[in-house]
C-alpha cells in the first residue's frame, strides 16, 4: 500500500490565487512527521514546511500552511497568493517515528503551474 | 539553512565505466547521509543510508555491488555507480540532516542533485 498518496499529478492555477495540494498518508505509528518539499526544474529539493503528528496547531511558514487533519490522515499544503515562481513539482513526504529513523518516504508529486 | 553540495551536477559516461558522485555537507557534520534516485517525472526513491565510518545500509532491491557508497568523513559521502549501463541513467540526489538546527523536525537538506546519462 502507498504510504504517501498525492492524487493530483498536475494543477494549473491563476497567479495570485490560493492553491491546495492534496496529500494523504498511511501509517500505524503514533509518532511521525510530515514534510512538503518543492522541486524546481533545476532539480534541488527545497524544504517548505513540517508538521509533527503531535502538533496541535497547523504549521505555517509565510505563504505556506499545512492543513493537518489527523483523523483523516491528510496533510494538504496550502499556498496563498500564488506567484509565478511557485511553478514546480511539490512532494509530500513522511518520516515514521521520531528517533533513530530519518528516512523519508515521498509521494509521487504534483506539478504546479502558475498562469500569469 | 544548512548547505549540502553535490558534484558533479551532470555527468555523461560510456557504458561499462564507473562514475563517482560526491555529496558534501558544507557547514555542518553529518554522521548520516541519504542517497535517493529519481527517474524522470517520478518520485524520489531511497537507495541507501550512508553512515560515517561504517557500512551503508541499502534498501531492498538496490544492488550493493553496483552502487558503492563510502562515507569516509563527517562531511563527505560518495556514491560510485560501477560498470554503468543506460538503465542507470537517472537523477541522483543526496541529503543530510543538520543536527544543530533540525533536531525536532528532522528536516533533511538536499544537494543539488547529479544527473547521470550513460550512453
Image: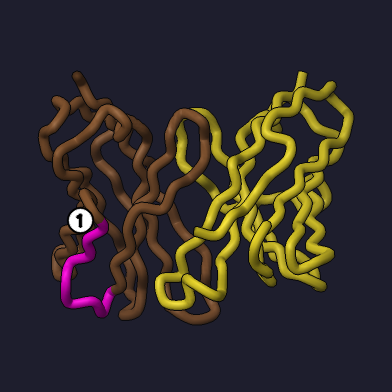
Q: Nearer the viewer, residue A87 or A67?
A: A87
- Name the secondary structure under disc 1: strand
Q: Image quadrant of residue B83? A: top right
What residue is rendered at 78% in x and 52% in y? B78
Q: Is residue A89 visible?
A: yes
- From the viewer's side, name the closer residue of B99 and A106: B99
- Quarter holding the C terminus of chain A is top left
Q: Quadrant of residue A84?
A: top left
Q: Position of residue B110 (x, y in %)?
A: 55, 51
In the image, residue A77 sits, relative to residue A87, either above or below, namely below
Residue A57 % position (x, y): 16, 73
Q: Is the stretch drawn in magenta largely helix, strand or loop? A: loop
Quadrant position of the N terminus of chain A in the picture: bottom left
Q: Chain of mark 1?
A: A
Which residue is pictured at 20% across the width and 25% down the height?
A: A12
- Which residue lies at the image location 71% right of the left edge and 54% below the top edge? B24
Vertical position of residue B91 compared to residue A115: above or below: below
Q: Position of residue B32 (x, y in %)?
A: 66, 68
A105 on left or right of A6: right
Judging by the rendered image, the residue that carries numbered circle 1 is A65
Pick the front one: B40 or B75 = B75
Q: Which residues are magenta?
A: A53-61
A32, above or below B49, in the image: below
Which colour represents chain B? yellow
Q: For the residue carrying disc 1, how many other residues have a C-alpha within 10 Å: few (<14), some (14-19), or many (20+)?
A: many
**The colour assigned to chain A within the rendered structure:** brown
Amino acid at each position: 500500500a502507498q504510504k504517501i498518496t498525492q492524487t493530483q499529478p498536475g494543477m494549473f492555477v491563476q497567479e495570485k490565487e490560493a492553491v491546495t495540494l492534496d496529500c494523504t498518508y498511511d501509517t500505524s505509528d503514533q509518532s511521525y512527521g510530515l514534510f512538503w518539499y518543492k522541486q524546481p526544474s533545476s532539480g534541488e529539493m527545497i524544504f517548505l514546511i513540517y508538521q509533527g503528528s503531535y502538533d496541535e496547531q497547523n504549521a505555517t511558514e509565510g505563504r505556506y500552511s499545512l492543513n493537518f487533519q489527523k483523523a483523516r490522515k491528510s496533510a494538504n499544503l496550502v499556498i496563498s497568493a500564488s506567484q509565478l515562481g511557485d511553478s514546480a513539482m511539490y512532494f509530500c513526504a513522511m518520516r515514521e517515528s521520531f528517533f533513530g529513523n530519518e528516512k523519508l518516504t515521498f509521494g509521487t508529486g504534483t506539478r504546479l503551474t502558475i498562469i500569469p | 539553512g544548512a548547505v549540502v553540495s553535490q558534484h558533479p551536477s551532470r555527468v555523461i559516461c560510456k557504458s561499462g565505466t564507473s562514475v563517482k558522485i560526491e555529496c558534501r555537507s558544507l557547514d555542518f557534520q553529518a554522521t548520516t547521509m541519504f542517497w535517493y534516485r529519481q527517474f524522470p517525472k517520478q518520485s524520489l526513491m531511497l537507495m541507501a543510508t550512508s553512515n560515517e565510518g561504517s557500512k551503508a545500509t541499502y534498501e531492498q532491491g538496490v544492488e550493493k555491488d553496483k552502487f558503492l557508497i563510502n562515507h569516509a568523513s563527517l562531511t563527505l559521502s560518495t556514491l560510485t555507480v560501477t560498470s554503468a549501463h543506460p538503465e542507470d541513467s537517472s537523477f541522483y540526489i543526496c541529503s543530510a540532516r543538520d543536527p544543530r538546527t533540525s533536531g525536532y523536525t528532522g528536516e533533511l537538506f538536499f544537494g543539488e542533485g547529479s544527473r547521470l546519462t550513460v550512453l
